[in-house]
Image: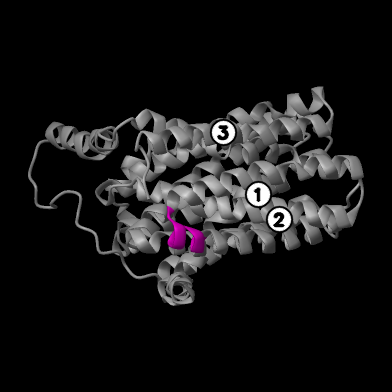
Amino acid sequence: MLQKWLKAIEVYGDKRMLTMMLLGFSSGFPYLLVFGTFSLWLKDAGVSLAAIGLFSLAKAPYSFKWLWSPVVDRVRLPLFNRLGRRRGWALFAQIWLMAAIWGMAVTNPAQNPVNMAVFAFLMVVASATQDIVLDAYRIESFNNREQGAGVAVFVLGYRFGTLFSGAGALFLAAVMSWEDVYKIMSLGAIVGMVAILCAKKEHQPEPEERNEKRGLWKRGVNFLKKSVIAPFADFMKRPKWFVILLFIFLYRMTDAYMAPMAYPFYDDMGFTKIEIASIIKLFGIMATIGGTLVGGVLVSRYGIVRSLLFCGILQGLTNMSFVWQAYAGHDLSVLMVTISLDNIASGMGTAAFVAYLSSLCNKEYTATQYALLSSFMSLARDIFAATSGFLAAAVSWPVFFWLTSFMVVPSLLLLAYMVKTRVIRG
């Protein structure tokens, strides 16, 4: 028994894991800059809860990145060609990302909300493009048995990235303006640039022979077939593929719906920026990292199905701890328990869920298929969650968190159906 657990853990010693952790950081740090940290900046600037919720629409590109993923999957960028297709696109996206965050830094959200929304939108497009590339690079770097550990380490880096843009940003915001904070945050892109430049060049066959001499029309049709139609057609060969997409949309609904209101909730409870940074961010991220590593081991030891079921139930139950927090108010000890429970469950769920998404991808179309799947996951977070501000304003905080806790139930019922009909195995 012990030997099996040790065998499941030893994969973390692979040298590829360090690269994945750094790339995970690059993928993670932009997220809070248009989400939690951004929500607190907006609230400090006097923006209403309803408007804060609507600002989440700027994150829509995360949900629709599949639209341009075929281009990222197949096309080489001329100026970045020497790095290879994956690494070239990654570096391009990271440069774009840094510029967009700087644009947010020099914009006042209260005085120029439209300009801020535009820069936030551009930043998300850059971040989503980077995610397309890095997810493909990660999936192609590991076999199926290694995917759980690869995901766990990537998410570990991702959480360090959110620690930088979460707790780090809040500590800085306590002593300087939000504008200066975001200027510093833009430097986070350098980590990804260094990692991708030092990463091993991918060994992947060219999508098309360079010496092909075809007419422009024929090349265009061929590109459309291979890059757009083929990846979707391949996925749709799966039995009940539409059920899979519905499950992907529903599984993280509980966390996705309450997330835009988390920081306004903490603020209403009277927690200061330093307290939020220390407990919710610093302490919470450590809990998430622990949960993520445990989730990776669970997938390796017990498989994807049982991990998804256990982690899904756990996420719904731990979300109820926010009801306790709403009644307790400004109580740091209760907050530590609440954040620990919620973040451990969230980390475990993320590892299991991303491992499942990765297992669905045909490595011939990695970037496009993973972008499609993760986009459906993002729909809950970026589109449906835009209404969370209206619900929070209409009901009390305890009622709001009770409702979000039960949003996990449909996905668990669907998972049971998928197991029964053998749509999902393992």
Whole-percent x, y for residue 57 in the image? 61, 31
The image quadrant of residue 108 is top right
Q: Residue at x 85, y 57 (%)?
A: 275
Three-letter amino acid code of the residue under disc 1: Leu
Query: Extreme left residue here?
Result: 213
Whole-percent x, y for residue 74 in the image? 27, 47
Label drawn at residue 245: none
Q: Is residue 187 visible?
A: no
Left/right placement of residue 289 relative to residue 358 reads: right
Alpha carbon distance from label 1 to label 3: 16 Å
Please provide the residue range marked out in magenta: 296-303
The reply to whether dot 1 and dot 2 touch (C-beta < 8 Å) is yes
Of tags 3 and 2, the one toward the viewer is: 3
Label drawn at residue 166: 2
Residue topped by disc 3: 380
Task: Specify which label sits upstream in the sequence, 3 or 2.
Answer: 2
Query: Extreme front residue here?
Result: 1
Label drawn at residue 32: 1
Left/right placement of residue 129 relative to residue 408 reads: left
Instruction: Using the image as rendered, state which of residue 123 and residue 410 is in the foreground.
Output: 410
Q: Residue at x 25, y 40 (%)?
A: 227
Question: Mark 3 falls on what kind of element?
Answer: helix
Whole-percent x, y for residue 230 in the image? 23, 37
Q: Residue at x 84, y 43 (%)?
A: 324
Question: Mark 2 falls on what kind of element?
Answer: helix
Whole-percent x, y for residue 254 in the image? 64, 37
Task: Specify which label sits upstream in the sequence, 1 or 2.
Answer: 1
Three-letter amino acid code of the residue under disc 3: Ala
Alpha carbon distance from label 3 to label 2: 22 Å
